[in-house]
């Protein structure tokens, strides 16, 4: 497993996930090693959606809170509540986020 970008010899932090192969320095993009460019693969909004989907069966209030953290950026969307949150709402949001470029999904 590779070290992440703030790992040191005294404090090693393993578990880095590189998106593209290439140089670990910013000098080029060779194909033999991993690149220092585009290290972050998952967005915070995706983590909120995963958490909402996981919380839904046991705690609908928590699921609605996670979903609203993303939905609140779109002024046209009514906030979800524990009574209105559904798996379809979460999955639709995942679909919207995966299909549109960064920043566009806040309009829907």
Image: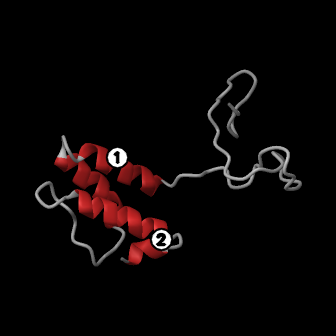
Q: Tell me which residue sits at (67%, 37%) in the image.
A: 4
- Real-space CA distance between mark 1 and mark 2, rounded to the nearest whole angstrom: 20 Å
Q: Is residue 42 left or right of residue 28?
A: left
CB within 8 Å, label 1 to label 2: no
Badge 2: residue crowd in 10 Å (few <14, some 14–19, many ≥20): few
Q: Tell me which residue sits at (26%, 44%) in the image.
A: 55
Percent from the top left, x then y, of residue 30? 87, 52
Percent from the top left, x then y, of residue 43? 51, 55
Q: Is residue 15 left or right of residue 102?
A: right
Q: How many marks?
A: 2
Badge 1: residue crowd in 10 Å (few <14, some 14–19, many ≥20): some
Percent from the top left, x then y, of residue 8? 73, 28
Badge 2 marks a residue whose secondary structure is helix
* Mark 1, residue position: 51
Q: Is residue 21 left or right of residue 72?
A: right
Q: Which dot marks residue 30? A: none
Q: Tell me which residue sits at (14%, 54%) in the image.
A: 82
* Mark 2, residue position: 99
If the image is split into quadrants, where does the C terminus sit? bottom left
If the image is split into quadrants, where does the N terminus sit? top right
Judging depth in this view, the residue of 3 and 99 nearest the camera is: 99
């Amino acid at each position: 497993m590779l070290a992440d970008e703030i790992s040191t010899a005294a404090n090693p932090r393993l578990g880095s996930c590189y998106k593209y192969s290439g140089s670990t320095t910013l000098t080029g993009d060779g194909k033999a090693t991993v690149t220092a460019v585009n290290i972050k693969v998952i967005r915070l909004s995706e983590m909120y959606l995963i958490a909402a989907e996981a919380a839904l069966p046991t705690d609908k209030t928590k699921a609605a809170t996670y979903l609203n953290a993303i939905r609140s950026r779109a002024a046209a969307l009514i906030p979800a509540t524990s009574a209105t949150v559904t798996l379809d709402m979460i999955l639709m949001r995942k679909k919207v986020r995966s299909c549109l470029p960064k920043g566009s999904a806040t309009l829907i």
